[in-house]
Image (tube, grey):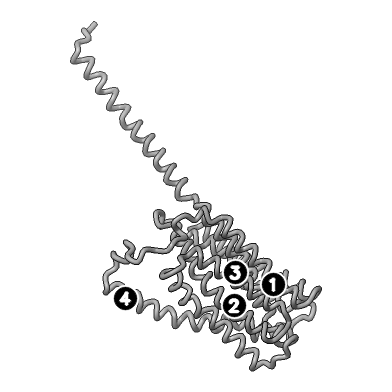
């Protein structure tokens, strides 16, 4: 029987240690992969605060816009040309004011306050629209455009800011966020059509105000989950310092091209709230309220968004 010398014993322990090392390494690697997968699959609670905030904000917007043209034609007795002018000015204001809202957030109020103030202005705008009188009508549209300009760009910015440390999840987060937008847009026409038919214009516009109130309350109650993502970005952020002047100019030129293409798209898209609404009322089955047709587009987006969220 061979003697067990100190050298032989040490060699045996080394051999067993070398055999155990790959096993421990594989185990640690598996645990790390599991932790990474879990981390990548989860989203911060703040995303769901913003999801429901925007769901109810879009419910209020789509409720109002679904009946806006009909209200101008049937209650205020505007002709088609005047409806087009007012509707176009309103939509133009809604999409111009975010330029102002972004500057206000960056220079003064920050993202969180802009969302709250914008939501309150929109709430007030819907309440003013519920008063069936022409001066209140125009005042309500102005309030809605200003409120949307403060809320819309800044709530989207907060979504992106939630993923500063995990940018690989940002695209999936925006898919979830936009799903909330389209869920609100899908259910709004059904609710407002029923309310308008049963209770009249004031209650229909008032329902949009209630939805906006829910949106603001959700955001305020859930603001603790947003943390620094809802605060103002420092004037000299790391992202800004890392972009060269040449890259900045290239990005601006790319955005200008996108703006032109986007303008043409939205010009056609927003006909659903003007000419297509009147056409649906006058040329389709009389048993279907014209507002209902505005739910088709959000439904399509919801269907495709579900697929993208699970495949991304």
Mark closer to the observer (2, 1): 2
Q: Residue at x 35, y 31 (%)?
A: 24
Report which residue position mark 2 lands on. Answer: 143
The residue that disc 4 covers is: 250
For mark 2, does the 10 Å Cα neighbourhood hold few (<14), some (14 to 19), or many (20 or more) residues? many
Report the Cα–Cα distance between label 1 and label 4.
Answer: 41 Å
Quickly name the residue at label 3. Answer: 120
- The residue that label 1 is drawn on is 189
Relative side of 298 to 72, left or right: left
Looking at the image, can residue 82 be seen?
yes
- Look at discs 3 and 4 and give the one toward the viewer: 3
Q: Residues within 10 Å of mark 1 (few under 14, many from 20)?
A: many
User: Spatial distance from mark 2 to mark 1, Cα to Cα?
Assistant: 22 Å
Distance between the alpha carbons at the discs numbered 4 and 2? 36 Å
3D distance between C-alphas at marks 1 and 3: 22 Å
Q: Position of residue 119 (x, y in %)?
A: 58, 68
Q: At x 56% / y 73%, what residue is drawn?
A: 147
The residue mark sitting in front, 1 or 3, is: 3
Residue drawn at the location 73% of the way across and 90% of the way down: 77
- Closer to the chain start, of discs 2 and 1, is 2
Rendering coords of residue 193 (x, y %): 74, 74
In the image, residue 224 sits, relative to residue 148, either above or below, namely: above
Q: Say which label, 4 or 2, has the lower sequence index.
A: 2
Q: Are marks 2 and 1 in contact (CB under 8 Å)?
A: no
Q: Earlier in the sequence, mark 1 or mark 3?
A: 3
* Horizontal and vertical percent position of residue 266: 53, 80
Dot 4: within a 10 Å radius of its alpha carbon, few (fewer than 14), some, or many (20 or more) residues? few
Q: Nearer the viewer, residue 148 or 164?
A: 148
């Amino acid at each position: 029987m061979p003697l067990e010398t100190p050298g032989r014993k040490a060699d045996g322990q080394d051999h067993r240690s070398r055999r155990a090392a790959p096993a421990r390494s594989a185990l640690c690697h598996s645990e790390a992969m599991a932790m990474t997968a879990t981390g990548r699959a989860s989203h911060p609670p703040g995303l769901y605060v913003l999801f429901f905030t925007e769901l109810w904000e879009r419910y209020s917007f789509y409720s109002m816009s679904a009946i806006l043209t009909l209200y101008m034609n049937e209650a205020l007795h505007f002709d088609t040309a005047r409806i087009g002018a007012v509707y176009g000015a309103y939509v133009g204001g809604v999409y111009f004011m975010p330029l102002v809202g972004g500057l206000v957030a960056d220079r003064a109020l920050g993202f969180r306050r802009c969302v709250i103030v914008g939501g309150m202005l929109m709430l007030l705008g819907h309440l003013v629209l519920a008063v069936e009188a022409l001066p209140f009508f125009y005042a309500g549209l102005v309030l809605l455009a200003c409120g949307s300009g403060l809320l819309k760009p800044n709530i989207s910015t907060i979504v992106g800011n939630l993923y500063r440390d995990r940018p690989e999840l940002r695209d999936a987060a925006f898919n979830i966020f936009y799903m909330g937008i389209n869920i609100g847009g899908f259910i709004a026409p059904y609710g407002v059509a029923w309310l308008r038919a049963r209770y009249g214009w004031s209650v229909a516009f008032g329902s949009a105000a209630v939805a906006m109130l829910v949106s603001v309350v959700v955001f305020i109650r859930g603001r603790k989950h947003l943390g620094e993502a809802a605060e103002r970005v420092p004037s000299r952020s790391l992202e800004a310092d890392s972009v060269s002047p040449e890259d900045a100019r290239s990005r601006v030129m790319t955005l200008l091209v996108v703006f032109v293409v986007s303008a043409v798209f939205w010009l056609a898209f927003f006909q659903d709230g003007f000419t297509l609404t009147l056409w649906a009322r006058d040329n389709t089955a009389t048993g279907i309220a014209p507002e209902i047709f505005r739910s088709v587009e959000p439904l399509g987006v919801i269907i495709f968004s579900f697929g993208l969220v699970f495949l991304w």
